[in-house]
Amino acid sequence: MTSQQASELQQAILRAQRDGITILARGTRKSDGARVWGVTSKSTHDHRLHQVVEVGGRLLCDCPSRVICKHRGLVHQDLVAQASRKPAPVAHDEQWSNWMHGGEW
């Protein structure tokens, strides 16, 4: 990520927080298995959700923004938070294997 993209992303996250934008839905698209989020919108008053989709490691949004939008920024922030909460992988070592097969610890 370039410094300009990082700056745009940070600005998008700040706009989302300022405007009270939230993720209301999470799911998987049946046609291709892509992850999908439904994100609220400040600009539409008909309770419309913007659709953010992860395609090829990139987040795409259906809003008309020409820069990193607050919807993508919020989803990115959520993904980073989820990744930080994942437990670290447990190393499979000889002692653990011995204990699992009835040996002493």
Image: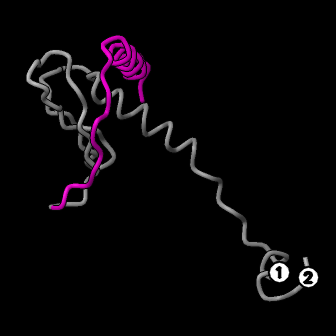
Q: Position of residue 49 (x, y in %)?
A: 17, 32
Label 1 Cα neighbours within 10 Å, binned few <14 / some 14-19 / many ≥20: few
Disc 2 residue type (three-letter):
Glu
Examine the image and state in which quarter residue 84 appears.
top right
The tag on residue 66 is none
Q: Nearer the viewer, residue 3 or 56?
A: 56
**Which residue is denoted by mark 1 in the rendering?**
99
Q: Which residues are magenta?
A: 1-30
The N terminus - image quarter: top left
Residue 2 placement, left or right of 42: right
Residue at the extreme top of the image, as rendered? 18
Examine the image and state in which quarter residue 98 appears.
bottom right
Q: Position of residue 87 (x, y in %)?
A: 62, 53
Residue at x 27% of width, y 41% of height: 25
Disc 1 residue type (three-letter):
Trp
Examine the image and state in which quarter residue 39 appears.
top left
Q: Earlier in the sequence, mark 2 or mark 1?
A: 1
**Dot 2 lies on which element?**
loop
Q: Nearer the viewer, residue 31 or 41?
A: 41
Is 101 situated above or below 63? below
Is 80 situated above or below 102? above
Q: Are marks 2 and 1 in contact (CB under 8 Å)?
A: yes
Residue at x 18% of width, y 61% of height: 30
Residue at x 77% of width, y 82% of height: 100
Label 2 Cα neighbours within 10 Å, binned few <14 / some 14-19 / many ≥20: few
**Which residue is denoted by mark 2 in the rendering?**
104
Residue 35 placement, left or right of 17: left
